[in-house]
Image (cartoon, rainbow, N blue to C red):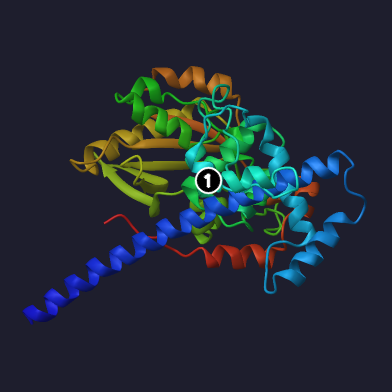
Amino acid sequence: MNDIRHYQNAVDVIKTAILQSQARAAKAVNQEQLALYFGIGRFISENTRNKNWGTGALKHISDSLKLELPGLRGFSETNLKNMRLFYEAWKHIESNSSVVTDELTGFQLETSENKAQIANNKQTTIRQLQLTNYAEFPLAEFLSISFTHHMAIINHTKDFDERLFYIRYCHNYKPTTEDLPSIIKKQDLYHHQEKMPNNFLSTIPDHKQAYRAIRMFKDEYLLDFINVEELGMHDEDVDESVIESNVVHNIKSFIMTFGRGFAFCGSQVHYDKLGHDHWIDLLFFNRDLNRTVVFELKNGKFKVSYLAQLSAYLRILNDEDRRSHEEAPLGLILCKDADKDYAGYIMQDFRQPMGVATYRTADEMDPEVLKALPPKEELIRLMQDNGTENLIKKS
């Protein structure tokens, strides 16, 4: 028995080494591919934008590459154009500095003009990123995501800071390339980040934790799995319990809307405090914040009384349910409409950490956005492919 245990330990050690090596190899391959595509993109851009090549040049080059390198993949005419887009999207962060960014080593195409130079310098490089103007440029994150992720970001965004935001998002949350366009267009995470009215800075003693909570939540969410038209109701007739039941039924979608680290603890969670019943709409635990998170759903406009109700729930959770290693619970009110400046002003006198966000349902989506999304059956399949690792109850 002891021998078997020792053998299993050996298996675990070797398996860990293999997985770590594979991860490093994949990272290196991805960096090399990005460097290669960036260099090819520059070469294509310089020759096509300056009219050095005629119409049909990229198709001819692609066809010739396939003949000369049988089995070659990734160099179709479309992908060559994508390489050009990739270079042109990021060329403004290049520098002519003689200092080279080691991580972005790669590729230079051989021409009659540079053949001798290449012979004398076998390891050529892509020019340094101009980090003097972009001190916070996320180079490690930039190099960690795939070319297809980069192209999805480039094709669906225009703003430099927005692109950096989604590069960091892809690095941290690992969305699929199929999910990414809808995340950018439908959820619009970039434009809703850090805008939710809250009192976190005044109620969470650790300011790093407070800023982490601020960055985690948006001021508006799209609960596109709820469609009141399918329920045969108008907005004003939809009961909050109906919306809540749809959230619970689609709890995986709800978790994906709010990001990683959430574990579902229950809905309509009952607490009896001094003979008074309290029912919490939705209760989660967030591993990144190490605290319980309460969501209160309201099918209407924000009311000050909602803050008092949420404050009472958080006080009870703090006294009755919080464990010694956990931080104080946090709460969010999700309502259909809110004067967010007013909500932010009022909640500053509350001692429990809370925020107010609004939500939209599927029937309120822009028809143009709906047209751009994959069919409903495809979205369901993508959801199913992502696994159910977050759907565990807090033990």
172 or 326, which lies in front?
Answer: 172
Identity of the residue drawn at 33% across and 49% down: 270
Q: Is residue 277 left or right of residue 320?
A: right
From this viewpoint, which residue is outermost toward the left?
2
Identity of the residue drawn at 72% across and 46% down: 41
Specify the quadrant of the image occupied by residue 129. Answer: top right
Q: Quadrant of the N terminus?
A: bottom left
348 or 384, which lies in front?
Answer: 384
Specify the quadrant of the image occupied by residue 15. Answer: bottom left
306 or 98, which lies in front?
Answer: 98
| Residue 154 picture location, percent across and down | 69, 43
Specify the quadrant of the image occupied by residue 63. Answer: bottom right
Identify the amino acid type marked 1. Leu
The number of numbered discs placed on residues in the rendered structure image is 1
Q: Is residue 95 left or right of residue 44?
A: left
Badge 1: how crowded within 10 Å, few (<14), some, or many (20+)?
Answer: many
| Residue 126 picture location, percent across and down | 60, 40
Q: Compared to 356, does 76 lie above or below? A: below
